Image (cartoon, helix red, strand yellow):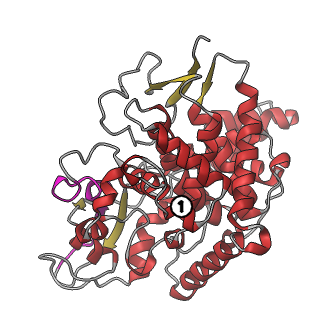
Amino acid sequence: MLLFFLKYYLAEFPGLRPLDSRLGFLTAFVAVSVAFWLFWPWGKHGEKPTVHRFSDPAVCLKILRNLPYGDSLGANRLSHEVSRATPNQRLVRAFQIDNGFTTTDKHYGRQFKNKAVKQLRHITSTDRGGWSQIATLAHDIASTYFRKFTSNKRAGLDLIVQVVTLKVVLAIFLGVDPAACTDGTALTIARMINLLWIQSKSETGSQSADFFLLKLLLQEIGLDWNDNKDSPLNILLPAYETLLRVVARCLVEVVFRPSADVQWLYILNEFRANPTPVTFSTIQPCKDNVTVEFLVNEALRLYPPTRRIYRHVHLEESQDPELLAVDIEQCHRLPHIWGEDSHRYWPARWLSEDESMRNAFMPFGGGDWICPASSGFGTMMIGVLVASFARIISADDWELQLRGEGPDDCSQSLDDETELDSDRHENTAWEIVKRNQ
């Protein structure tokens, strides 16, 4: 990175190239020093703390509520805001954001959450066309983008879902005209977000040149800001990240899984034509009385948007602070709650929903800082996007190949009924290959 910066600096200012002179040497030293200051991982602070992971639903909920849990040594000395925000500082360093998930300011945190709730109500208000308008927008964006692949023999399903989901989020949350954001720009923004997110998890994760590229791309589509609190990423990140992976995996489960019921596609299409909270949860003429709500809940159970939620605590009788991990994914797969087939996508299990399932189901977190999308917006939005994709991508026309990070890795099969890979990768390719007609 330093060498790249130096080469770029000298290429832009050719008069400073003669390094054999004192001025040239001083210039090179300044360039390297500036690059060193910009890209050194200042975000690294001491040893990485030991992570204590929990998967008991009752204990997990206490941790999320900042209450004494299990055999813990007293109450948490840290405020709820500090406990929540501290593990998220990696995202501040990577994305320069300042939102309700990263702030230690209680007043600003509440203000951010209330603003988000009002925005969700506004987005779905009948004055704006409600869910019908959102469904039409999602279907139009998906159809327009997918039409470009109809003449190809293969296409990247993961890339299609990334671009369409991002464009929909940009349009409904930030008012970006889909036509103003080219497919190439949308794909690069999506890739930069994923790359920066992965980088933020490393011990040396800090602000990098990738962030500045992301900011330039957002400025290109009309989103500009100077203060972290005004960054569009404050909204874009939680909205996009909440939807992306669960939409992609739900689509695979209902369209390409051999055990999928064809009637699931029927109720999705009926919902797409009339997307309301009533049609979302009303039993349709489908085998086992499965509804769209069941399809989405089962996807959220197996593939929660946030697999683990972290809290930084310093207990009264403990000398050192600790990092706790609420393992949402594990809570959603406990056999004694969800059954021996808990690793299988089977929406009909929600017909037997009981209190233990309700208590263990935390796809949007829990406690006072549960995600605003948990009010019903998140599940409806997932249903609308999956229905839009399922309308234009058919298993009769396309075969899915799940590939890992390696070029020859195609180890995951849809026939074994196990859950799909839910890890975040940089180069995972989910390809759809056109069947011979």
Residue 293 point in image, percent of width and height: 47, 59
As for residue 410 lying within the magenta part, the answer is no
The N terminus: image quadrant = top right
Dot 1 falls on a residue whose secondary structure is: helix
Number of marks: 1
The reply, left or right, for residue 62 in relation to residue 207 is left
* Residue at the outermost right position: 15
In front here: 342 or 234?
342
* Residue at the outermost top position: 436
Q: Identify the magenta region.
A: 318-338
> Image height check: is 88 above or below 35?
below
User: Amino acid type of disc 1?
Assistant: Phe
In front here: 402 or 298?
298
Q: Which residue sits at x=34%, y=82%? A: 78
Residue 232 point in image, percent of width and height: 70, 63
List the residue tagged with mark 1.
280
* Residue at the outermost left position: 71
The C terminus: image quadrant = top right
